[in-house]
Amino acid sequence: MTFVQLIECRTSRLDEMNRLMDRWVEQTKGKRTATHSVVAKDRADSSHIVEIVEFPSYEEAMRNSGLPETDRIFQDMVALCDETPTFTDLDVVRDEQLNSATARRFFELAPGQGAAPPFNDVFIEGYHDHDPSNVQDVIGLDAFRREVEVWRGGFDFSFTIEDQIAQGDRVCTRWTWKGHHKGEFLGIPPTGKDVTMTGTTVHRCTPDGKIAEGWWQYDRLGLMQQLGALDPLEL
């Protein structure tokens, strides 16, 4: 079970504390067991500092606390604080990755029949889509919905998410797409073929968890080959 330690203190020497944390990261390289750390400042009280440190488990947190470098840094941190820091130990019972959930929601909604769904809970109105197969980027939610409808008109399809990595405001999703060619697609008459391709999409999300921008990389050439749309000289 993931374990989180909440460290709260009051200090007017935040810059010195940041340099102290940099020193701890350098000194414990290859030894520390913390996987993620965030230092935040209270907007209503700039002297109130909160550090959130994540560990794979309580046992790993205790092992991290036992490092001599950690003990030395703690003593230096206390000297920078106006009062003794307080520690709260938390077992994580739910961890919702909101941006990842939004990206997954799109891959669930995109397949289907007929008109594309509104996507209002997934994308911002000014969504910007980068697809190397398009001559120009697609800008605007309505324009992107029309792109989705081109694929819906040509195929009965589905996405399988193979991997997903989120960092900051970016979510990278590696997917497999499978489709049945039922209708005209980019001038290609329906072939009745079952086709597949793989790809990766990077989404940039807004602070409220909606998708603002997307970058696509996928095997478009392989798809065209499966549909018999390529001249032998193009293979």
Image: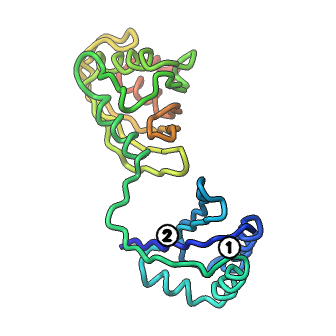
Question: Who's the residue at 44% across and 15% down the image?
Answer: 143
Residue highlighted by disc 1: 25
Q: Is residue 7 left or right of residue 47?
A: left
Compared to residue 58, the image places residue 109 above or below, namely above
Question: Who's the residue at 46% across and 39% down the image?
Answer: 208
Q: Which mark is residue 222?
A: none
Mark 2 surroundings: few (<14), some (14-19) or many (≥20) residues within 10 A: many
Compared to residue 36, the image places residue 68 above or below, namely below
Residue highlighted by disc 2: 54
Q: Is residue 1 left or right of residue 72?
A: left
The image quarter containing residue 27 is bottom right
Q: Name the residue type under label 1.
A: Val
Query: Tag 2, which secondary structure?
Result: strand
Q: Name the residue type under label 2.
A: Glu
User: Residue 165's x, y, as percent?
Assistant: 47, 51
The image quarter containing residue 25 is bottom right
Mark 1 surroundings: few (<14), some (14-19) or many (≥20) residues within 10 A: some
What's the distance in space between the residues labelled 2 and 1, CA to CA?
Answer: 14 Å
User: Residue 123's x, y, as percent?
Assistant: 43, 29
Question: Who's the residue at 49% across and 69% down the image?
Answer: 54
Query: Tag 1, which secondary structure?
Result: helix
Discs 2, 1 touching: Cβ within 8 Å: no
Residue 111 or residue 69, whichever sits in front: 69
Residue 213 or residue 5, whichever sits in front: 5
User: Residue 84's x, y, as percent?
Assistant: 61, 81
